Amino acid sequence: MTKRVEATEHAFAKELLAVISERPYRDPLLDAIRSGQMSRAGMKLWVAQAMMVVREFTRFISAMHANCPHADAQLLLAENLWEEHGQGVAGRDHYSLIRRLARALGATDEELDQTVPLAETTAYIDYCLKVTRESSFIEGMAAIGIGIEYFSPRFFAALAEALTASYGISRKDVEYLLVHVGEDEDHARRSLEVITAYADTDEKREGAKQALRDMLQVKHLFADAVYASCAKV
C-alpha cells in the first residue's frame, strides 16, 4: 500500500467521523437516571424496547457477512457474530443478557414476550435490516460499526454505572452493558479500518457517509421516542 493511499484512507476516516459531528446528540436517559427523574418502571420499559433491537442484531451482522467479498472483513464480522452469541456459552448471548437486565428491573418473562415495539423501534430495526441486506457491506459497516458500535462503549459504561448507583442493580445484572465496553470499541476501530481500506472510490465513500447519516437520524428518533415513552411512567 503506497503512502498516497494511506493518506487518502486516513483522510476518509476523518471524513466519516466528521459526519457524527454534523448531528451532535446527547441521549437524555443518563441525565434522567442520575437526577432521579427516571423511575425504575420507566427504565424497565426502556430496556424492553432496547431488547427488541438486540434480538435482531445477529441478523444485521449476518446480512453484512453475506454481502462481503473480503476475507479480513468477513473474519471481523464472524467474530462479532460469535460474540453476540455469547461465544457459544448458554445464557451469555447478548439477548439473554439484556433479558436478565430487564428482569433485574422487575420485568417478567411474560411482560418481555408481550412487549409491543414503538413505531420508532420498528423503524430503527427496519433501517438496520435494509442497510445491511440491500446496501453494500461498506455502507452496512458504516451504519452498524460506526453508527451504533462507535458510541456503545462510553454510553453503556456510563449507563451501567448509573443503573447500579440509582437502582441497586448488581454488576452481574448489567453484564449486557459491560460486555460492550471492550467488544464494541474493538469492533468500531476495526470497522473503520475495513471501511477505509475498501471504500476506494468517491461513490463508495459517499455511500458510506450517507448510510451513517441515515443511521444517526433513525437512531436518534428511536432514542428520543423511547425516552419520551418511559419518562411518563
Image (cartoon, rainbow, N blue to C red):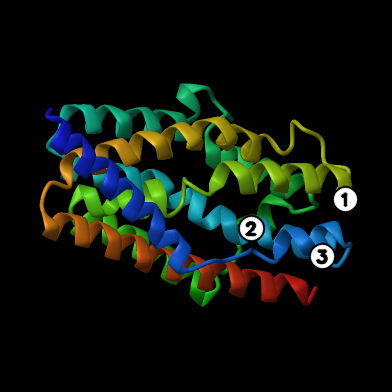
Is the residue 99 above or below the residue 179 in the image?
Answer: below
How packed mark 3 is, by other alpha carbons closer than 10 Å (few <14, some 14-19, many 20 or more), is many
The answer to whether residue 9 is left or right of residue 33 is left
- The residue identified by callout 2 is 48
Q: CA distance from mark 3 to mark 1?
A: 10 Å
Q: Which circle's residue, 3 or 2, is located before the other in the chain? A: 3
How packed mark 2 is, by other alpha carbons closer than 10 Å (few <14, some 14-19, many 20 or more), is many
Are the residues at dot 3 and dot 1 in contact (C-beta closer than 8 Å)?
Answer: yes
Is the residue 32 above or below the residue 8 in the image?
Answer: below
Q: Residue at x 49, y 36 (%)?
A: 185
- Where is residue 10, by image quadrant? top left
Q: CA distance from mark 1 to mark 2?
A: 18 Å
Helix, strand or loop at disc 1? helix
Q: Give how far across and how far down residue 42 sits, in percent.
A: 77, 65
Name the quarter where the N terminus is drawn.
top left
For this rendering, which residue is in front, 213 or 76?
213
Is the residue 1 above or below the residue 152 in the image?
Answer: above
- Where is residue 81, by image quadrant? top left
For this rendering, which residue is in front, 64 or 109?
64
The answer to whether residue 132 is left or right of residue 158 is left
Q: CA distance from mark 3 to mark 2?
A: 15 Å
Q: Which circle's residue, 3 or 1, is located before the other in the chain? A: 3
Callout 1, which amino acid?
A: Ser
- The residue identified by callout 1 is 166
Q: Give how far across and how far down residue 168 sits, in percent.
A: 88, 43
Is the residue 172 above or below the residue 226 in the image?
Answer: above
The answer to whether residue 134 is left or right of residue 52 is left
- The residue identified by callout 3 is 38
